[in-house]
Image: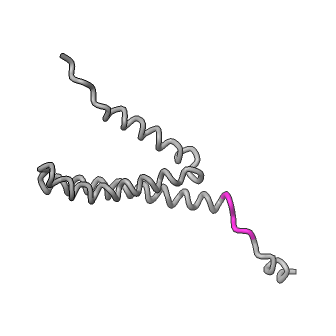
């Protein structure tokens, strides 16, 4: 008998496709980056709360927590670049008063 396939490999592919949005248009899809940061932050309490319930050793739980911390680093960089790109696309407009003062 063949064991039933797990959906985990497919989920990883879907998540990879999910990340293509910010790669193509980081300003419009900044919410994906924010969602990823939230997911990285959620790994820590999930590992610390659910780990003892499942009998996972403490050092494995700490390794799981490190994935949340290390995963947040590239997402923070991507968020920083998306914010910079949004200010580049929409530069602040000068005040009407400053235009009158220059004349």
Q: Which residue appears at 40% of the width and 35% of the height?
A: 13
Q: Is residue 67 above or below residue 15?
A: below
Q: Is residue 10 left or right of residue 82?
A: left
Would residue 91 be counted in the magenta stretch?
A: yes
Q: Is residue 54 above or below residue 81?
A: above
| Numbered circles on residues, count | 0
Residue that sits furthest to the bottom in the current view: 101
Instruction: Give whichever of 21, 55 is nearer the camera.
Output: 55
Q: Is residue 82 left or right of residue 36?
A: right
Q: Which residue appears at 29% of the width and 53% of the height?
A: 67
Q: Is residue 10 above or below residue 21?
A: above
Q: Position of residue 81 (x, y in %)?
A: 53, 58
Q: Is residue 99 left or right of residue 77?
A: right
Q: Is residue 98 above or below residue 64?
A: below
The magenta-colored residue range is 89-93
Q: Which residue appears at 27% of the width and 26% of the height?
A: 5
Q: Position of residue 73 (x, y in %)?
A: 38, 58
Which secondary structure dominates the residues rendered in magenta?
loop
């Amino acid at each position: 008998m063949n064991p039933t396939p797990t959906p985990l490999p497919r989920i990883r592919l879907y998540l990879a496709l999910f990340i293509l949005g910010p790669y193509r248009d980081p300003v419009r899809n900044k919410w994906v980056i924010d969602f990823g940061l939230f997911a990285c932050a959620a790994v820590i309490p999930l590992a610390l709360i659910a780990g003892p319930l499942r009998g996972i050793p403490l050092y494995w739980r700490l390794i799981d927590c490190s994935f949340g911390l290390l995963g947040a680093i590239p997402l923070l960089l991507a968020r920083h670049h998306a914010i910079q790109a949004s200010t580049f696309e929409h530069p602040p407009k000068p005040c009407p008063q400053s235009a009158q003062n220059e004349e």
